[in-house]
Image (spheres, rainbow, N blue to C red):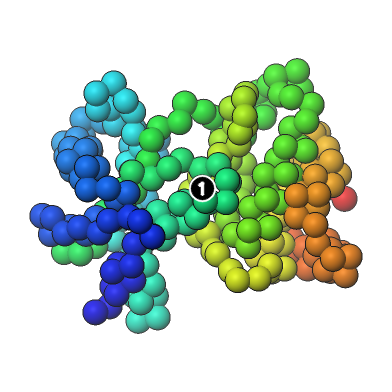
Amino acid sequence: MLWYPLQIPPSGHSKHHRQSMIFWTPTPQEIPLTLHLLQLVQKKKYDFPLKVDRPSSLYVVSKNRQRYVVKTYHRRHFAKTLRNLLLLPRAFSAYRLAYFFLEKSIPTPSPIAAVYQPLVGIAHLITPYLPAQSLHQLLPHHSAEFFPPSLPRLLGKAVGKMHRACVFHNDLKTSNILWQPHPPYFHFVDLDHSQQTSVFSLRLASRDLSCLLAYGGWWAKKWGCLRFIRSYLQANPLPSSLRDKLFQKTLQKTHQRRLQRKSLPPQYSLPF
């Protein structure tokens, strides 16, 4: 069976078949809620869309005065090659990694269900709605007084903790980091491309740091890049040889390739 990984939900979670769908849920009680939310999205009775696009769309839906986010992965999001057909659909991968994040005390919205519809090649991921804004939305419009002075330190600690657990986001830009003015301050979202490895990966760590410091280069200069890096290394203490290789060699090369590939202007260069 090509979708054999769908047989292996996270430990303690349930897998169910219903209405030509495959469900992963923490318990069977989430299935009626999941079906109801999907019906509301199908009938376009959602509160408002967060994003309507391919390869995925985001909708905010209400049920019993509670809001949820339904992320729909369209057909184009599933790879055509045999190698990638053997991998999990992104909704199930994001579901599994979200619970791994939570096990390691890395803040992220706790998924309610992942759903796959094999006949149409569409998947869904359902999470609670967090009334928070991304750093990408907040930083350009607020002065330093709006944020705690420890913002770079807190963000460096959060990213360092994630990398210490050998988990790498792979799309770590400010639009994928939600901020709230009380602990835990940050929530990482959009885990579709995230990877979990058995050992620390210089390549994946440099990709995360390059993405965050490139697309947030202006905030890094404004809010203190060195404080971010110092806090990152405190949360993820690397041997000196590995640390030097990461910041003096691997990260620089990764970032230069990103600048060339994306044709980014000079202000997106590393702020150190």
Q: Does residue 65 sit above or below 22 in this rendering?
A: above
Quadrant into which the N terminus falls = bottom left
Could you tell me if residue 75 is visible in this image? yes
Q: Which residue is mark 1?
A: 102
Q: In the image, what residue type sits under mark 1?
A: Leu
Counting the numbered discs, the total is 1
Q: Is residue 211 left or right of residue 149?
A: left
Q: What residue is shown at x 37% (from left), y 41% (from top)?
A: 127
User: Horizontal and vertical percent for residue 251?
Assistant: 77, 63
Q: What residue is shown at x 38% (from left), y 60% (from top)?
A: 11
Q: Is residue 69 left or right of residue 175?
A: left
Q: Is residue 7 left or right of residue 189?
A: left
Q: What residue is shown at x 74% (from left), y 44% (from top)?
A: 156
Could you tell me if residue 137 is visible in this image? no
Determine the image quadrant of residue 216: top right
Determine the image quadrant of residue 129: top left
Q: What residue is shown at x 80% (from left), y 45% (from top)?
A: 231
User: Horizontal and vertical percent for residue 43?
Assistant: 16, 36
Q: Nearer the viewer, residue 199 or 94?
A: 199
Outermost residue toward the left in this view: 19
Q: Residues within 10 Å of mark 1 (few under 14, many from 20)?
A: few
Q: Nearer the viewer, residue 85 or 201?
A: 201
Q: Tag 1, which secondary structure?
A: helix
User: Horizontal and vertical percent for residue 48?
Assistant: 33, 29
Outermost residue toward the front in this view: 12
Q: Is residue 135 left or right of residue 267?
A: left
User: Horizontal and vertical percent for residue 26?
Assistant: 32, 49
Determine the image quadrant of residue 59: top left
